[in-house]
Amino acid sequence: MSLYFAQLSMTELRNAPGEILDRVADEGEAFIIERNGKQKACLVPLSIFSPDIPPSRIAEEFQRLNDQGEKPRTSFTEGREIAFSFPADKDNDSSIRIAILLPHGYPNNCPRVTATPVRDDSPHRWADGALCIYGVMTGWNPGKHTVLSTLQLARRWVENYEIWSSTGEWPAIGGNAE
Protein backbone atom coordinates (compact mmCIF):
# COMPACT_ATOMS: atom_id res chain seq x y z
CA MET A 1 0.00 0.00 0.00
CA SER A 2 1.51 3.28 -1.09
CA LEU A 3 1.01 6.35 1.05
CA TYR A 4 1.24 9.87 -0.22
CA PHE A 5 1.87 12.50 2.43
CA ALA A 6 0.51 16.03 2.26
CA GLN A 7 2.14 18.82 4.27
CA LEU A 8 0.03 20.18 7.12
CA SER A 9 1.00 23.01 9.43
CA MET A 10 0.42 22.72 13.14
CA THR A 11 -1.89 25.74 12.87
CA GLU A 12 -4.07 23.96 10.29
CA LEU A 13 -4.24 20.90 12.53
CA ARG A 14 -5.06 23.02 15.58
CA ASN A 15 -7.87 24.81 13.70
CA ALA A 16 -9.68 21.64 12.54
CA PRO A 17 -8.44 18.57 14.42
CA GLY A 18 -11.67 16.58 14.06
CA GLU A 19 -11.93 17.24 10.34
CA ILE A 20 -8.29 16.28 9.77
CA LEU A 21 -8.63 13.07 11.81
CA ASP A 22 -11.77 12.14 9.86
CA ARG A 23 -9.87 12.60 6.60
CA VAL A 24 -7.13 10.32 7.89
CA ALA A 25 -9.46 7.67 9.31
CA ASP A 26 -12.22 7.71 6.69
CA GLU A 27 -10.44 8.69 3.50
CA GLY A 28 -6.99 7.22 4.13
CA GLU A 29 -5.14 10.53 3.79
CA ALA A 30 -1.72 10.92 5.41
CA PHE A 31 -0.06 14.12 6.60
CA ILE A 32 3.36 15.34 7.66
CA ILE A 33 2.85 17.86 10.46
CA GLU A 34 5.12 20.89 10.39
CA ARG A 35 5.80 23.27 13.24
CA ASN A 36 8.00 26.32 12.88
CA GLY A 37 8.99 25.13 9.43
CA LYS A 38 10.25 21.73 10.67
CA GLN A 39 8.68 18.34 10.10
CA LYS A 40 7.66 17.03 13.52
CA ALA A 41 5.27 14.11 13.13
CA CYS A 42 2.91 12.31 10.82
CA LEU A 43 -0.73 11.28 10.85
CA VAL A 44 -1.51 8.02 9.08
CA PRO A 45 -4.55 5.73 9.04
CA LEU A 46 -4.48 2.92 11.59
CA SER A 47 -4.95 0.49 8.71
CA ILE A 48 -1.24 1.00 7.94
CA PHE A 49 -0.43 -0.90 11.13
CA SER A 50 -3.50 -3.10 11.43
CA PRO A 51 -3.82 -6.65 10.26
CA ASP A 52 -6.49 -7.87 7.90
CA ILE A 53 -9.16 -7.89 10.63
CA PRO A 54 -12.42 -5.98 10.40
CA PRO A 55 -12.07 -2.81 12.51
CA SER A 56 -15.51 -3.46 14.02
CA ARG A 57 -14.29 -6.84 15.33
CA ILE A 58 -11.20 -5.23 16.87
CA ALA A 59 -13.44 -2.64 18.58
CA GLU A 60 -15.74 -5.40 19.87
CA GLU A 61 -12.77 -7.31 21.29
CA PHE A 62 -11.47 -4.22 23.11
CA GLN A 63 -14.95 -3.48 24.47
CA ARG A 64 -15.39 -7.03 25.81
CA LEU A 65 -12.00 -6.85 27.51
CA ASN A 66 -12.73 -3.41 28.94
CA ASP A 67 -16.14 -4.55 30.24
CA GLN A 68 -14.34 -7.27 32.23
CA GLY A 69 -11.71 -4.92 33.61
CA GLU A 70 -8.93 -6.35 31.47
CA LYS A 71 -6.17 -3.93 30.52
CA PRO A 72 -3.85 -5.71 28.10
CA ARG A 73 -0.65 -4.33 26.72
CA THR A 74 -1.35 -4.13 23.01
CA SER A 75 1.12 -3.89 20.16
CA PHE A 76 1.50 -4.61 16.47
CA THR A 77 4.04 -7.18 15.35
CA GLU A 78 6.40 -6.62 12.44
CA GLY A 79 3.99 -8.78 10.44
CA ARG A 80 1.14 -6.35 11.28
CA GLU A 81 -0.65 -8.72 13.62
CA ILE A 82 -2.20 -7.55 16.88
CA ALA A 83 -0.53 -8.88 20.02
CA PHE A 84 -2.23 -8.70 23.42
CA SER A 85 -0.28 -9.37 26.61
CA PHE A 86 -1.99 -10.16 29.93
CA PRO A 87 -0.90 -11.26 33.38
CA ALA A 88 -1.77 -14.91 33.93
CA ASP A 89 -3.57 -13.93 37.13
CA LYS A 90 -5.55 -10.71 36.80
CA ASP A 91 -5.85 -10.20 40.57
CA ASN A 92 -2.34 -11.11 41.69
CA ASP A 93 1.09 -10.18 40.43
CA SER A 94 1.99 -13.19 38.32
CA SER A 95 5.36 -13.78 36.74
CA ILE A 96 3.69 -15.66 33.88
CA ARG A 97 2.31 -13.57 31.03
CA ILE A 98 -0.14 -14.71 28.41
CA ALA A 99 0.23 -13.47 24.83
CA ILE A 100 -2.62 -13.69 22.36
CA LEU A 101 -1.68 -12.99 18.76
CA LEU A 102 -4.49 -12.22 16.32
CA PRO A 103 -3.40 -13.36 12.87
CA HIS A 104 -4.46 -11.92 9.55
CA GLY A 105 -7.94 -13.14 8.78
CA TYR A 106 -9.02 -13.28 12.43
CA PRO A 107 -11.63 -14.32 13.54
CA ASN A 108 -11.73 -16.93 10.77
CA ASN A 109 -8.16 -17.87 11.73
CA CYS A 110 -7.53 -19.04 15.28
CA PRO A 111 -5.35 -16.86 17.52
CA ARG A 112 -1.93 -18.10 18.63
CA VAL A 113 -1.58 -18.18 22.41
CA THR A 114 1.62 -18.48 24.42
CA ALA A 115 2.58 -18.23 28.08
CA THR A 116 6.01 -17.18 29.32
CA PRO A 117 8.02 -18.17 31.16
CA VAL A 118 7.07 -21.86 31.21
CA ARG A 119 9.26 -24.93 31.15
CA ASP A 120 10.24 -26.23 27.72
CA ASP A 121 8.97 -29.71 28.63
CA SER A 122 5.52 -28.55 29.72
CA PRO A 123 2.68 -30.59 28.22
CA HIS A 124 -0.34 -29.44 26.25
CA ARG A 125 1.59 -27.20 23.88
CA TRP A 126 1.99 -27.36 20.14
CA ALA A 127 5.42 -27.94 18.58
CA ASP A 128 5.90 -24.17 18.17
CA GLY A 129 5.29 -23.60 21.90
CA ALA A 130 1.74 -22.28 21.53
CA LEU A 131 -0.72 -23.43 24.17
CA CYS A 132 -2.98 -26.29 23.19
CA ILE A 133 -6.26 -24.70 24.23
CA TYR A 134 -8.04 -25.15 20.90
CA GLY A 135 -7.72 -28.50 19.25
CA VAL A 136 -9.29 -31.91 19.65
CA MET A 137 -11.62 -31.16 22.58
CA THR A 138 -12.47 -27.53 21.86
CA GLY A 139 -12.23 -26.32 18.29
CA TRP A 140 -11.89 -22.64 17.48
CA ASN A 141 -15.28 -21.21 16.54
CA PRO A 142 -15.13 -17.66 15.08
CA GLY A 143 -18.78 -17.05 15.87
CA LYS A 144 -18.42 -18.07 19.50
CA HIS A 145 -14.85 -17.48 20.65
CA THR A 146 -13.26 -14.11 21.37
CA VAL A 147 -10.03 -12.76 22.81
CA LEU A 148 -11.74 -12.79 26.22
CA SER A 149 -12.83 -16.44 25.97
CA THR A 150 -9.35 -17.31 24.71
CA LEU A 151 -7.80 -15.49 27.67
CA GLN A 152 -10.05 -17.45 30.07
CA LEU A 153 -8.93 -20.75 28.50
CA ALA A 154 -5.29 -19.65 28.63
CA ARG A 155 -5.62 -18.75 32.31
CA ARG A 156 -7.10 -22.18 32.95
CA TRP A 157 -4.11 -23.66 31.09
CA VAL A 158 -1.73 -21.71 33.39
CA GLU A 159 -3.59 -22.99 36.47
CA ASN A 160 -3.14 -26.55 35.16
CA TYR A 161 0.50 -25.83 34.37
CA GLU A 162 1.13 -24.68 37.94
CA ILE A 163 -0.48 -27.88 39.28
CA TRP A 164 1.64 -29.95 36.88
CA SER A 165 4.79 -28.06 37.93
CA SER A 166 4.27 -28.98 41.58
CA THR A 167 2.75 -32.50 41.25
CA GLY A 168 3.99 -33.81 37.91
CA GLU A 169 0.38 -34.58 36.89
CA TRP A 170 -1.72 -32.53 34.49
CA PRO A 171 -5.32 -32.17 35.77
CA ALA A 172 -8.17 -34.07 34.11
CA ILE A 173 -9.17 -32.99 30.62
CA GLY A 174 -12.16 -31.05 32.01
CA GLY A 175 -9.68 -28.56 33.43
CA ASN A 176 -8.35 -27.78 29.96
CA ALA A 177 -11.45 -27.76 27.77
CA GLU A 178 -14.21 -25.21 27.62
Image (cartoon, rainbow, N blue to C red):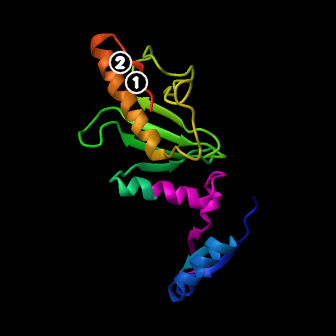
Q: For the view shown, which residue lies furthest in the bottom direction?
A: 15
The amino acid type, in three-letter code, at marker 2 is Pro
Q: Can residue 46 be found in the magenta stretch?
A: yes
> In the image, residue 50 lies at what x, y percent?
61, 55
Q: Where is residue 171, by image quadrant?
A: top left
> In the image, residue 100 lies at what x, y percent?
49, 40
Q: Dot 1: within a 10 Å radius of its alpha carbon, few (fewer than 14), some, or many (20 or more) residues?
A: few
Q: Nearer the viewer, residue 10 or 151?
A: 151
Q: Which mark is residue 89?
A: none
Label 2 close to label 1 by CB (< 8 Å): yes
> In the image, residue 173 lies at what x, y percent?
42, 20
Q: Is residue 2 above or below residue 174?
A: below
Is residue 31 in view from this perspective? no
Which label lies toward us, 2 or 1?
Answer: 1
- The CA distance from mark 2 to mark 1 is 8 Å
Q: Is residue 70 above or below residue 56?
A: above
**Which residue position holds label 2?**
171
Q: Is residue 129 above or below residue 167?
A: below
Quick one: SS at disc 2? loop
Quick one: SS at disc 1? helix
**Which residue position holds label 1?**
174
Q: Nearer the viewer, residue 38 or 25?
A: 25
Residue drawn at (42%, 34%), measured in percent from left and top? 154
Query: Would residue 20 be found to the left or right of residue 118 on screen?
Result: right
Magenta range: 36-62
Is residue 177 in view from this perspective? yes
Query: Would residue 19 be found to the left or right of residue 71 on screen?
Result: right
Residue drawn at (38%, 18%), measured in percent from left and top? 172
Q: Is residue 2 above or below residue 153?
A: below
Q: Dot 2: within a 10 Å radius of its alpha carbon, few (fewer than 14), some, or many (20 or more) residues?
A: some
